[in-house]
Amino acid sequence: MTVIETPVVSSAQRRRCWIPSFPAANETGPELPTDRLPEFDDMEQRCWQVFLESSTRLFETLNRRLVHAHQLTMFDFLVLDVLAKSPHASARMGDLAQALAVGPSRVTEQIRRLEGERLVRRSRSTNDGRGVIATITREGRVRVKVAASTYGRDIRRHYLDQMSRNQMIAMGDSCRRVSARLRAAEDPPKRF
């Protein structure tokens, strides 16, 4: 009996097979596989896949650069940046989670790790004994300030410089509308 080995093809390779380049909205592109997502037409499928791939690659690129240059993950940087820009360089843990659009447990874990590196310290709220306040330390301020240059430079290089001003504005407006809709869906309806 002869065994025929089939090559293993990753999902990224499959995506590249049908999205070698993204055509303009009025052009026709390569055929999509027949197993596309239900309710999506060809253009919607291509737009979603390109967005997903580009946002994932951008996040990974920014994260890799911050870790390599500053020993900070992108999430480390974002937490420190929010704290550095907050009044009194502090924020309640719940407010921090909301600002970063993540769950409270993710912020707690992150703050605990950053506290171990002496970049952040935690304390009880003086206004509410149950609340926990995260405060960036002097060392945390220094690290985030230096990392901000790398972060900004890489955003310009890999994101902003890839679009015209009008495309950038359209992308920002589209993302704002999606975020507003998602935020509204997260908020429970108010009862009167």
Image (cartoon, helix red, strand yellow):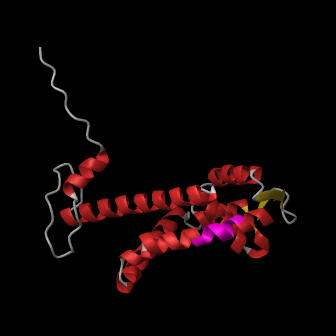
- Main SS, magenta region, reads helix
Quadrant in which residue 167 is drawn: bottom left
Magenta span of residues: 143-149
**Residue at the image point whose x is 40% and y is 80% from the top:** 168
Quadrant in which residue 91 is drawn: bottom right
The residue furthest right is 126
Quadrant in which residue 2 is drawn: top left
The residue furthest bottom is 166
- In this view of the protein, can residue 47 be seen by the observer? yes
Number of numbered discs overlaid on the protein picture? 0
Query: Left or right: 136 with respect to 29?
Result: right
**Residue at the image point whose x is 35% and y is 58% from the top:** 53
The N terminus sits in image quarter? top left
- In this view of the protein, can residue 192 be seen by the observer? no
Residue nearest the viewer, comparing 65 with 24: 65
Query: Left or right: 159 with respect to 122?
Result: left
Q: Position of residue 172 (x, y in %)?
A: 43, 77
Q: Position of residue 149 (x, y in %)?
A: 59, 72
Q: Is residue 67 magenta?
A: no
**Residue at the image point whose x is 26% and y is 53% from the top:** 15
The residue furthest top is 1
**Residue at the image point whose x is 74% and y is 52% from the top:** 117
The C terminus sits in image quarter? bottom right
Q: Position of residue 121 (x, y in %)?
A: 80, 58
Query: Left or right: 64 with respect to 22?
Result: right
In the picture shown, does residue 122 fall above or below 82?
Answer: above
In the picture shown, does residue 126 fall above or below 176?
Answer: above
Query: Left or right: 126 with respect to 190?
Result: right
